[in-house]
Image (cartoon, coloured by chain):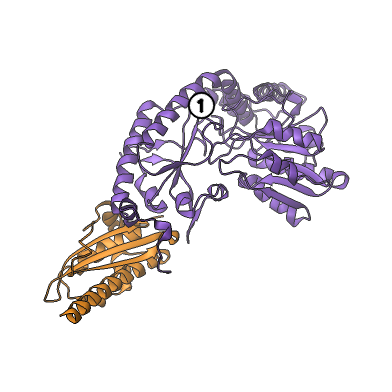
Chain colours: A orange, B purple
Amino acid sequence: MAYSDKVLDHYENPRNVGSLDKNDPHVGTGMVGAPACGDVMKLMIKVNDSGIIEDAKFKTYGCGSAIASSSLVTEWLKGKTVDEAYEIKNSAIAEELALPPVKIHCSVLAEDAIKAAVADIKAKQLAAKEAV
Amino acid sequence: MERKPIYLDYSATTPVDPRVAEKMIPYLTEHFGNPASRSHTYGWTAEKAVENARDEVAKLVGADSREIVWTSGATESNNLAIKGAAHFYAASKGKHLITIATEHKAVIDVVRELERQGFEATFIEPEPDGLVDLAKFNAAIRPDTVLASVMLVNNEIGVIQDIESIGKICRENNVIFHVDAAQATGKVKIDLETLPVDLMSFSAHKTYGPKGIGALYVRRKPRIRIEAQMHGGGHERGMRSGTLPTHQIVGMGEAFRIAREEMELENARIRKLRDRLLAGLQTIEETYVNGDLARRVPHNLNISFNYVEGESLIMAVKDIAVSSGSACTSASLEPSYVLRALGRSDELAHSSIRFSLGRFTTEADVDYTIELMKSKIGKLRELSPLWEMFKDGIDISKVQWAAH
């Protein structure tokens, strides 16, 4: 299968690989996919008190396109507000990486991972408020 | 210039041995005669070369040269043997066939075609080690079983079936026994004088001969009859018409002669290399060898790397030429049906690699491969959330995954 140069670049040199402290109240985690389907993405974002994403890390079990999609979104997320992050669309990821039609699901999964991480941090913030 | 990947895919095909190529060339240019031409020296020279090659093929497998029929390769041999015998004996013996779920497609799809033509078939599932349980084989035989087909050496996992015992069961039950030996020549000793086998398929290009030539062994005592699948000039005693490709046949003969003379030394050398590769790869955690290790040709190592996804693994090992347990089709990644038949999970089947070593593999090739695999598997696992969970002691099979 032929990959675009951008996919190959992210696959060879993935950005922001790793994990953040999942118990940190400023960290939101999104884990999507399933091993049997061939893709699992874990995305973690660290959000400061102004609602800006300061850091993003990922780990992905999946094909080159899945690795590239998640690597790319960690770059995009940094500096964005949580609400801006929520607006990132899979079509933008697919376009940036020139994904072929059979690999569009990788970009969908990356969008799902962002939404799951954002939902997690919002739930944490809500729980913190209620606790006060 | 970029350096070529190290070739570790000898089970897919082998290079033609330079000694073989050298022997073939004069039969393309100088001795170009048609071996069926009976009236001049061009034909006689070609015929003599064809018969010498037939002797060499017969000698490697303990057969009489009159039992060897030239074909275009093992796929044609399998078609000719299975369809030819099934059709010839259907009326007298019946229309039931037995084969194994892990056979090559060139057997499975022939049996499937016969099913469409009104035959019935039993596909026996092998044990988790890849070998056929003899009791299960025995139980599959019916009064109307006409033919059974079992491969000698599996192409993916390299396991060696107990052809002698299976053949005995076939003899006791008056079932014709076909064996696909495409992956076996030069690797396993074959003696058809003692083996209870009626039909056996061979290929040249898996044994350092040219592509496009193969042979079918058809037993004379007791005589096995087959219906021709290719009709024409009545070559090969009517079993397979078509002008004989003299240069290809000469190549196969020379390749099989070399195999007979050198296999013992060569197999010992390759076994050492394979064991070195195995020892090196087993220093990587969570690796699983697919198929029995003892009853296996020394050339094959099929191994799964857990928590690494198949397609990214293929991308990672582009500096070596190997085969993967995933067939990359345009739309999806299909795990190997052979590994699935052994009961491997889809994930482990996807993350498997078949390393097959051969005549020109060196110790340096093996050492390079070990280091490459260590570093690439390490990198992919560092990326893998599943590996992280495994390391944290989480049982991944018990995690509730969101469907998508």
| Amino acid type shown at disc 1 | Asp
Decide if residue B229 is in sight here: no
- The foreground one among B247 and A111 is A111
Q: Picture coordinates of residue A94 (x, y %)?
A: 33, 68
- Residue B53: give x, y in percent of width and height: 66, 24
Residue positioned most to the left = A50
Q: Nearer the viewer, residue A50 or A21?
A: A21
Position of residue B370 relative to residue A16, above or below, is above
Q: How many marks?
A: 1
> Which image quadrant is residue A3 in?
bottom left
Which residue is located at x 48 percent, y 48 percent? B325
Q: Residues within 10 Å of mark 1 (few under 14, many from 20)?
A: some
A115 sits left or right of B41 in the view: left
Q: Is residue B144 visible?
A: yes
Instruction: Say which quadrant the C terminus of chain B sits in.
Output: bottom left
For the point 64% across and 40% down, which residue is it?
A: B132
In this view, the residue in front, B319 or B345, is: B345
Q: Where is residue B338 drawn, in percent x and y?
A: 56, 47
| Residue A41 x/y as whole percent | 33, 62
Q: Is residue B39 above or below residue A35?
A: above
Q: Nearer the viewer, residue B273 or A31?
A: A31
In the figure, is residue B365 to the left or right of B153? left
Residue B167 shown left or right of residue B256 in the figure: right
Q: Which quarter of the rendering shows the N terminus of chain B?
A: top left
Q: Could you say which quadrant of the image residue B102 lies in?
A: top right
What is the chain identity of the residue bearing mark 1?
Answer: B
**Vertically, is A109 above or below B246?**
below
Assign a secondary structure to mark 1.
loop
Answer with the quarter of the image where residue B129 lies.
top right
Question: Which residue is label 1 attached to?
Answer: B17
Vertical relation: A49 (above or below) B390: below
Give me the residue at 56% from left, 34% from top: B205
